Amino acid sequence: MNKQWAAYKESQAFADRVKTLYGAGEGVLDNQKARYGKLVERFEARFGTAHGELCFFSAPGRTEIGGNHTDHNNGRVLAAAVNLDTIACVEKTNDGHIVVDSEGFPPIVVDTADLAVCKEDYGSTFSLIRGTAGIMKDMGYTVGGFRATVSSSVLRGSGLSSSAAFEVLIAAILDGLYNGWVVDSKLRAVIAQKVENVYFGKPCGLMDQMASSVGGMVTIDFETPDAKVEALACDFAAKGYALCVVNTGGNHGDLTDDYAAIRTEMEAVAAQFGKKVLREVPQADVESNIGKLRAAVGDRAVLRALHFYDDNARVLEQVAAIRKGDIDAFFDAVNRSGNSSWMLLQNVYARPAEEQMAMGIELSRRFLAGEGAQRVHGGGFAGTIQAYVPMARLDAYIAMIESAFGKGSCTPLMIRPEGAVMMPMQA
């Protein structure tokens, strides 16, 4: 066993880190010891005995709580980092090559001497690694080689944003190894978004990366380039509810065009008023020109624009309810957001005969019967829904969901108070 890890895993420092990032539930510490230990073992099996100091990095997945597809049109969102994360065991190297061995995938090698954008690499993990180094170098930061083994509990296509967690993780590694951990968490999120937009070829907003990088529960207003981020405190468990995500099946991997169409159509409405994004157009201007807009951009684009305005306002309702401790008002806004996503935004299903998300939402609504809330989660079209379930009924809810979608399909989440972290193995 690696001597650094052998000492660190039994230390109070590691125990404290685990409690903060993953909670203090029964078996959590032992589970994380096994998880991180496996990562170290895989590092030495893949790369041999480390020549220098090993270090862990972690970046969390995120759950979207309010503001469905509002961020890319400079709207408001409410989001939180969660206790599912992407972790890496890392050693700095001096050869200029980044080697990433992600669990279940072939190793990826990036030469930091060649960081050009290549459209042929769009949609690949290679492009995310290369892009992070490229964007950071362009911004004046030092980049260089490292080798890492990576593992993630943020399942791909789960709606918890595994791609954002990975982007934030790579940015954190380059910052920690080569820049002294100086990159602000908000700037790290901007770097990650640019990587996805420029190198990966996906026109995403900034919410996923910001929630993962900053941590905790945050409300973010994207009206200006310098996004306003405010922290919120909310303990759903203390109020008697579990925040759950349900994997209803399907995968986000082939839905890039569906996601892009939402942004494109919202911006098409804005363009009718000479603006780039809907946040720059007063809601009244859209509502008083419905006929002209229908003829110019079509019904779906107009409906999606109306959803933007409504959900943008609902974020303020949710934030106010959280600050007042009014859980019923918060749940009412969650349910209305879900209904709007279904009816106006139209991102509950993408293809005929694949309506798993609709089924999950309806089963949850029937089970909860007015308690808690349920809604589409994240980008939509496939993947996960979100539900707030009374703790006293959680076991029954999980059993009901698993009977419909399979064992392990329901995951209760903890809001993680920290975003990306660097964890030197110091006992």
Image: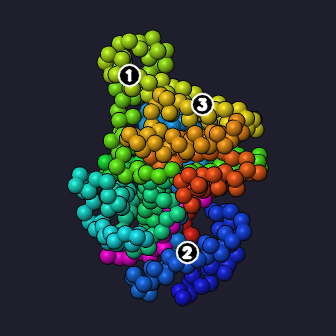
* Circle 1: residue type: Asp
What is the magenta segment's predominant secondary structure? Answer: strand
Vertical position of residue 67 compared to residue 10: above or below: above
Which residue shows up at 41% across the image and 12% down it?
Answer: 289
Residue at the spot of label 3: 336
Residue 171, by quadrant, is bottom left
Amino acid type indicated by mark 3: Arg
Q: Earlier in the sequence, mark 3 or mark 2?
A: 2
**Which circle's residue, 1 or 3, is located before the other in the chain?**
1
Give the structural element (helix, strand or loop) at label 2.
helix
Q: Which residue: 55% across, 74% down?
A: 36
- Position of the N terminus by quadrant: bottom right
Q: Amino acid at mark 2?
A: Tyr
Alpha carbons under labels 3 and 2: distance apart? 40 Å
Residue where numbered disc 1 is placed: 299
Nearer to me, 170 or 356: 356
Residue 35 included in the magenta stretch of the image: no
- The tag earlier along the polypeptide, 2 or 1, is 2
Within 10 Å of disc 2 (Cα), the crowding (few <14, some 14-19, many 20+) is some
* Residue 72 x %, y %: 43, 37
Q: Which residue is mark 2?
A: 36
Q: Is residue 232 visible?
A: no
